[in-house]
DNA sequence: GTTCCCCTACTCGGATACACTTTGTCCGAGTATGATCGG
DNA sequence: CCGATCATACTCGGACAAAGTGTATCCGAGTAGGGGAAC
């Protein structure tokens, strides 16, 4: 499983917003905390806002804030908001008779693997990323 | 889960060899059955041979043949022979204090997802890809 | 008939050129707030 | 004192440039089997 830079930044951006609840945070601040360019952060935040994960405020005192509680935002939603749907891909069009069956099986296996990844990512919420004692993730690591 | 074109072709190449047991098959034939260039097929076959999944014969009557039984070759081995080790990747170097914990959790989650994928891919063998009635994969799809 | 040599057909593997996706940057446009000016 | 207008600071989102990675192709080198010539 590999995230893209952008989706990883998106997750951290959401975490940053979660650290400032009930507060409108400018994109510039998010960019600074992630050490990335303001434009890049804005693009990320826009994508998240379009998906309804965060809320954007226009105008002079504008900015972003979390739209739901951290427990209600899964990592899967964040990643899919940025990288698009996370599904199986077998980049092969058609195949001769003897190998077409193998192609199908290949698809089935990849489909299963993708499903596993989706489940794993949907299990982790922003609350888990916050690092509090209530985290369900690190606790299991020991 | 998404394979690259090359790793998908590699899987099909192994299946093709499995369809011709105890027989030395030229790279050219494999290329033809996959409808790809001979050079591309050779590169794939070389990578597989380097990993010991298939055996290469030099010289005039040279070619390739399976080195093990189809049941003993997992899809994971094929994919990793081509695309390299299949592990978690969180492409972020370091992060400010408040977000470093989130980074760690992110890594843990991705690590788990990667592990799931590896398990899924190691469960499928070339024998499953052959499409015989003994396939453990398609049978479960129903 | 045997031996030696060369030719041929294959694999090997590095190098290179191409294509596509991801990433980063820029800029014009829209929007709401606050200040300023005029009534 | 009140309301309209303007300036400001932010988001929006499309377009573009740069970088990185996956993909395809090329070419010289090495290897082993077969055929032919000489002994």
Image (cartoon, coloured by chain):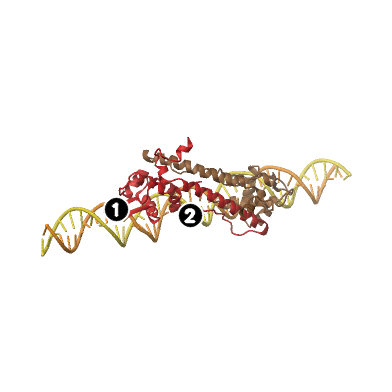
Chain colours: A brown, B red, C orange, D yellow
Residue A142: image x %, image y %? 62, 55
The picture places residue B88, in percent across and down from the top left corner, at 54, 53
User: Mark 1 highlights which residue?
Assistant: B62
What residue sits 59% from the left and 59% below the top? B93
Q: Residue at x 36, y 48 (%)?
A: B37
Counting residues from the start of the chain, the first of labels 2 and 1 encountered is 1
Q: What SS does tag 1 mark?
A: loop
Tell me which corner region of the image, top left, top right, bottom left or bottom right, holds residue D13. top right
Left or right of B92? Residue B47 is left
Q: Chain of mark 2?
A: B
The span from disc 2 to disc 1 (Cα, nearest Å) is 29 Å
Please check whether the numbered discs 2 and 1 fall on a single chain. yes
**Can you see residue A120?**
yes
Image location (x, y in percent) of residue D31 = 29, 59
Asked if marks 2 and 1 touch (Cβ < 8 Å), the reply is no
- Return the chain for callout 1: B
Rendered view: B15 above or below C5: above
Is B53 on the left or on the right of D1, as rendered? left
- Report crowding for label 2: few under 14, some 14 to 19, many 20 or more residues within 10 A (C-alpha): few
Q: Compared with residue B40, is residue D28 higher up or lower down, i.e. above or below?
A: below
| Residue D22 horizontal/vertical position (percent) | 46, 51
Give the residue at mark 2. B85
Q: Secondary structure at mark 2?
A: loop
Instruction: Say which of D37 and A137 sits in front.
Output: A137
Residue B132: image quadrant is top left
């Amino acid at each position: 499983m590999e995230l893209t830079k952008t989706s990883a930044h998106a997750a951290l951006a959401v975490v940053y917003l979660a650290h400032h609840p009930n507060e409108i945070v400018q994109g510039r601040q998010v960019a600074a905390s992630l050490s990335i360019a303001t434009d890049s952060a804005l693009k990320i935040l826009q994508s998240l806002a379009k998906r309804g994960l965060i809320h954007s405020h226009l105008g002079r005192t504008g900015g972003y804030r979390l739209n739901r509680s951290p427990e209600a935002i899964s990592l899967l939603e964040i990643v899919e908001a940025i990288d698009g749907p996370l599904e199986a891909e077998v980049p092969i069009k058609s195949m001769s008779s003897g190998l077409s069956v193998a192609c199908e099986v290949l698809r089935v296996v990849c489909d299963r693997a993708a499903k596993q990844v989706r489940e794993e990512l949907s299990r982790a919420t922003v609350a888990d990323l916050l690092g509090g004692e209530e985290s369900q993730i690190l606790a299991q690591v020991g």
